[in-house]
Image (cartoon, rainbow, N blue to C red):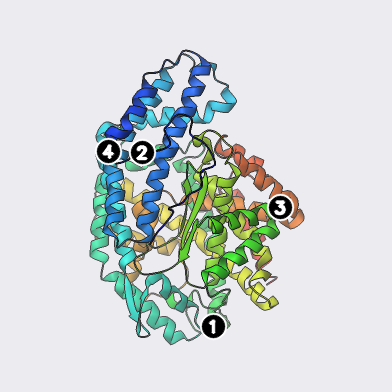
Amino acid sequence: MEILTNIPHAFARKFLPESVDFSAWTKIEPFFQQLESRSLETSEALESWIQDRSELMDVINEEGSLRYIRMTCDTENKELETAYFHFLEEISENVKAADDQLKRQFLKSPARRQLERERFFVMDRSFQNDVDLFREENIPLETEESKLSQSYQKLMGSLTVQFESKEQTLQQMGRYQEYPDRGLREAAWKAVVERRLMESEKLEKIFDELRTVRQRISANAGFSSYREFAFKQRERFDYSVEDCLRFHEGVEAAVVPLARRMDEQRAGELGIPRLRPWDLSVDPLNRPPLKPFTEATELVEGCVKIAGKVDPRFGGFIRTMRDEQLLNLESRKGKAPGGYQSSLTEARLPFIFMNAVGLDGDVRTLLHEAGHAFHVFATRDEPLGHYRHAPIEFCEVASMSMELLGGEQLEVFYASAEDLKRSRKKHLEGVVDILPWIARVDAFQHWIYTHPEHSVEERRRHWLDLHRRFGGLEDWKGFELAQATSWHRQLHIFELPFYYIEYAIAQLGALQVWMNSKTDFAGAVASYWSALQLGGSRPLPELFTRANIRFDFGPSSLKPLMEAVEKELKTM
């Protein structure tokens, strides 16, 4: 399968030659040496150096992204996996050490203080943070961490079950959870759970190895726990551990009761005494699953129209991605699970990966990843690569707002008012349901990395304790081991530790964008687009302010937003 073989590059290189050889570090090292040898005595020289370093990192990062994309599109292709691992070991490891030297050179430059503060403050702060964290002995450990994460992806991407006389991926099996036939749902759910449980020991072993590596990385950097290290590594300059714990408390007080009321209503509508895990996605009135599309081409064309209704330029962006083959959407065996948007940093173009199987949720997923893609398009003319990437907490505002704004235009996929209402209600209920899950995953990781010597059994017991705090009303009787290991399906715990609360912070921001749109749709979209154009050039609270929303994810924000969502749900 040929993936991304003809990428259009609209921005000419000024520092690097047109062709760069990534076969060995010795081919890349001279470019770093050239930058390191420069005199940075004047602000003009320093700004030119900043731009050339940006170009160098854009080219290198794009190569890494391309190899990762190709590997995740075909996890069974050993050549693609070998090429990605070669990049990690031969290029990426050496780049980390060489770029650390460049950042130190920047920080020591006498011209650093002459730079315009408002323009360069965010980058300067980030460079200082990176230098503070950098330890050469962590480079091979970070590569080991990446390899272990890939082993999780490869294992999960390989899982299939025989169901209804055909082999199906676990992603494809998800569609059965929306079928009215309760027996079929249960059988499908059990097939997936049993297949995942067959790999539970391997998954626990992978995670324990990841935990050990992460503890070593944080200890090398001088931190008493990996949590301390991760917060600094993730550049959480604008909120703290305590803020996250307040979020957990706010979810427990304001969201969990609403989610449980929704569960009670669902059980009543289904006419069953208690919910089981296979009753959580089906339409509670036992209507057949929504079928917004059959083929991925229909999904793309529909989302072009939806995005165009939100803002004409947004529809144009998805058309560009379609035409330039920057979309890989269908689920198939050997493809990594999940979905993501990756930036091709030199071309300054987005790529979207997902596993569409024809569900209503697939429409939301593409709109979500399209929101990320719009962020890339919004910052194409920003010369510094560092500023083309916003903090994750705001990147997700871009994506989640697009789900909500686009959700107002779903008549593209649904002709009947009933189906429109069903889809919108399902989405809002999903927003309510996801916040306790995020709190649970985040609280789980806080516990994991502040109890570094815990056993597998202790970890499972704590996960169950968190279900009692944040979970719904479904009954897992007879499937206790499946419940205790249900965190295995959350790839962030394996691949992106502590990266999950960002979704909650952003979801609360996106709800505010959506609420603004209820009174002034054009104004809300204009503020949203204006904030996207800032990229990562301003601190996180300023990005929220530009979007005309508050940066706050504590109880005082959660309560009124949940009240607004519940009020909206009562109209459906």
Q: Which residue is mark 3?
A: 516
Inter-mark Cα distance, 2 to 3: 37 Å
Residue 435 visible in the picture? yes
Mark 3 or 1 closer to N-term? 1
Secondary structure beneath label 2: helix
Q: Which residue is mark 1?
A: 270
Between circles 4 and 1, the one closer to the viewer is 4
- In this view, which residue lies farthest toward the right? 519
Dividing the picture into quadrants, the one containing residue 202 is bottom left
Secondary structure beneath label 3: helix
| Disc number for residue 24 | 4
Mark 4 or 2 closer to N-term? 4
Residue 496 visible in the picture? no
Between circles 3 and 1, the one closer to the viewer is 3
Secondary structure beneath label 4: loop
Amino acid tagged 3 = Asn
Residue contact between numbered discs 3 and 1, judged by CB atoms under 8 Å: no
**Quadrant showing the N terminus:** bottom left
